[in-house]
Amino acid sequence: MRVMWKKVKYPRIDLREGEVLIIAPPGTDIDALLKQKRVWIEEKTRLIEKLKERAEEEIKRYGIRILDKYVEVRHSCTKTGVVDHRVYICRKRSGYLREQLRNMLRRDLQRKIERYAEVLGVHPHRVYIREQKTKWGSCSSSKNLSFNLLLIFLPADFREYVVAHEMVHLIYPSHGTGFKEKLNSLGIRIPGREETLYNWYYAGMCKEKLLL
Ligand SMILES: [Zn+2]
């Protein structure tokens, strides 16, 4: 267990990294918090285990999903990158594959961005593909959008949601009523927490298998 003291309004417990991480404002009674949240922590830990197993099983059975197509993983240094329905990995040249994936994702997201730009009447200043640790996407005050490279491993409807979400942030920086109404008006499905968590582990495993 790790405690991170931070000036937040309420304490938060994060289990995503496989350990209990508590982010709490200084002065929080950690023992009391743990006691109060014990059942929740146990349930969530079990859920995470289940989701990780499901992700592993999916990868083992079908291969790795890249922009909604399952590809078979091959280790080779004569061929590299995504070719047809296979992905060739050469550990010494993972930079090449990274670059290829980044370009593939950029093309996919760009199409979605353009569509929402037309509907919403806003355009991002710049679009970055990054390898963020905790976020799928973000929108800066200077109207630059960043998207996580891991999105390439997720289903199209999830990418659709993340793009719509960040595009609406170009109009409403925070998650207030205006933001929610605008996002709803786009008629896209909002993924549930469990699905989001599953995607997180699935994408993490894909990345581990391909790029690390
Ligand atoms: Zn947001």
Image: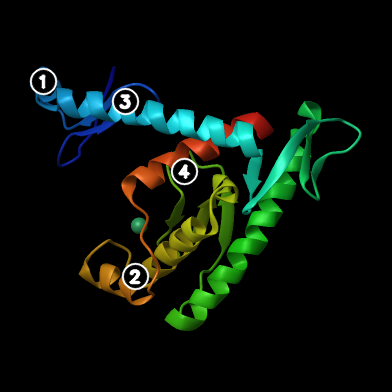
Q: Nearer the viewer, mark 1 or mark 4?
A: 4
Give the distance between the C-alpha atoms of the residues marked 4 and 3, in whole angstroms.
Answer: 16 Å
**Which sits earlier in the primary sequence, circle 2 or circle 1?**
1
Q: Element type at marker 1?
A: helix
Q: Nearer the viewer, residue 119 or 86?
A: 86
- Label disc, if present, on residue 46 of the rendered structure: 3
Crowding at dot 3, Cα within 10 Å, few <14 / some 14-19 / many 20+, comes out as few
Q: Nearer the viewer, mark 3 or mark 2?
A: 3
**Which sits earlier in the primary sequence, circle 3 or circle 2?**
3
Q: Residue at x 28, y 61 (%)?
A: 174
**Which sits earlier in the primary sequence, circle 4 or circle 3?**
3
**Which sits earlier in the primary sequence, circle 4 or circle 2?**
2
Mark 2 CB lies closer than 8 A to ligand 1: no
Would you name the residue on which mark 4 appears?
199
Crowding at dot 2, Cα within 10 Å, few <14 / some 14-19 / many 20+, comes out as many
Residue type at tag 3: Arg
**Which sits earlier in the primary sequence, circle 1 or circle 4?**
1
Residue 9 coordinates in the image, percent (x, y) = 15, 42
Residue 148 coordinates in the image, percent (x, y) = 53, 48
Residue type at tag 1: Lys
Q: Is residue 199 above or below residue 47?
A: below
Give the distance between the C-alpha atoms of the residues marked 1 and 4, in whole angstroms.
Answer: 29 Å
Left or right: residue 94 versus residue 7 is right
Residue type at tag 4: Asn
Mark 1 CB lies closer than 8 A to ligand 1: no
Answer whether labels 1 and 4 touch (C-beta < 8 Å). Answer: no
Answer whether labels 3 and 2 touch (C-beta < 8 Å). Answer: no
Crowding at dot 1, Cα within 10 Å, few <14 / some 14-19 / many 20+, comes out as few
Would you name the residue on which mark 2 appears?
183
Would you name the residue on which mark 1 appears?
35
